[in-house]
Amino acid sequence: MGRPYAVKGRKKKRKLDDAAASDAAPPAEEAEELPPPEKADEEKGKDQEEVVEEEVRAAAEGLPVVPRPVDGKRRPGAIFVLERACLEVGKVGKTMLILNSDDHANYLRKQERNPADYRPDIIHQALLAIFDSPLTKAGRLQAVYVRTEKGVLFEIKPHVRMPRTFKRFCGLMSQLLQKLSITAVGKREKLLNVIKNPVTRYLPVGARKIGLSYSAEKSVNLFDYVAKTSDDETLVFVVGAMAHGKIDKEYSDDYIQICNYPLSAACCLNRICSALEQKWNIQ
């Protein structure tokens, strides 16, 4: 005598329910416990601090050097002075960092400062415009001097390979302003070095100091202006690396305007490098 259909059907239904429950719930061993929201935020903050510390540590180890062109001929060159660069170190959490308007806006507001004034990205872009130019690669860059809003003056050697990323650059600048110098990788040569003011004591005798500003009264065509200069004199270009304002023209021999529109520091430096490359036939 066979079993009743009702009993057989209940058994089948129970098997289906067990299979569905096993598919819906993962095994206890594979289940992942999520940390509370507060702990997750703390861990995220620690990860960010570790990344920043790694960038600073990498900057402290030194900078790579670009091979210098070997040429016995003495050729004219150019010097750049970047004024009023916004590079200020502040203690955020447990780490000393270069303050910027994107990452430290709340910190700056608590300190009753205007976040719009903290733009280290301007000097980063300006330095990349100089060191990436054919002018520098041809060996015609003599030196670069940077003076911050706080009056700290430092020199950058022309054969430095500048960091490409903004975080790495900020780590380098933070290390420089605290340790006062950055050396080359595997060498004792100081590639970046904090020096004493004023900048005029380091400029060659007889150098022509040219200040550039949108507010200058004298408007010139930069390519014609550079072409008329003598090859015997060193050209020193003074450019502002700040978001707003103008540079001090006290030590400038000439104060010129090169465009009818306000230009960023990087765009202005690109024009200067292009004019010098055309003058000295640098392809």
Image (cartoon, grey):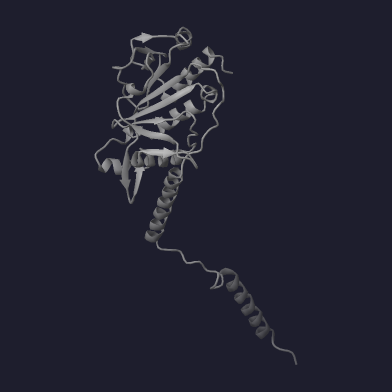
Q: Please state, as top left, top right, bottom left or bottom right, where the C terminus lies in the image.
A: top right
In which quadrant of the rendered view does residue 264 lie? top left
Q: Is residue 115 above or below residue 129?
A: below
Residue drawn 38% across the image and 34% down it: 193
* Relative image position of residue 152 (x, y in whole percent): 31, 32
Residue 2 percent location from the top left of the image: 74, 89
In the rendered image, the quadrant that contains the N terminus is bottom right
Question: Which residue lies most toward the right here?
Answer: 1
Furthest residue in direction front, as rendered? 72
Q: Is residue 119 visible?
A: no
In this view, the residue in front, 26 or 57, is 57
Q: Quadrant of residue 35?
A: bottom left
238 relative to 111 in the view: left or right: right
User: Compared to 16, does 173 lie above or below?
Assistant: above
x, y percentage for residue 95? 35, 49
Residue farthest bottom in this picture: 1
Q: Can I make out residue 116 in this image?
A: yes
Q: Please, which residue is most extreme toward the left here?
A: 112
**Percent coordinates x, y for residue 235 in the rendering:** 42, 16
Q: Quadrant of residue 83?
A: top left
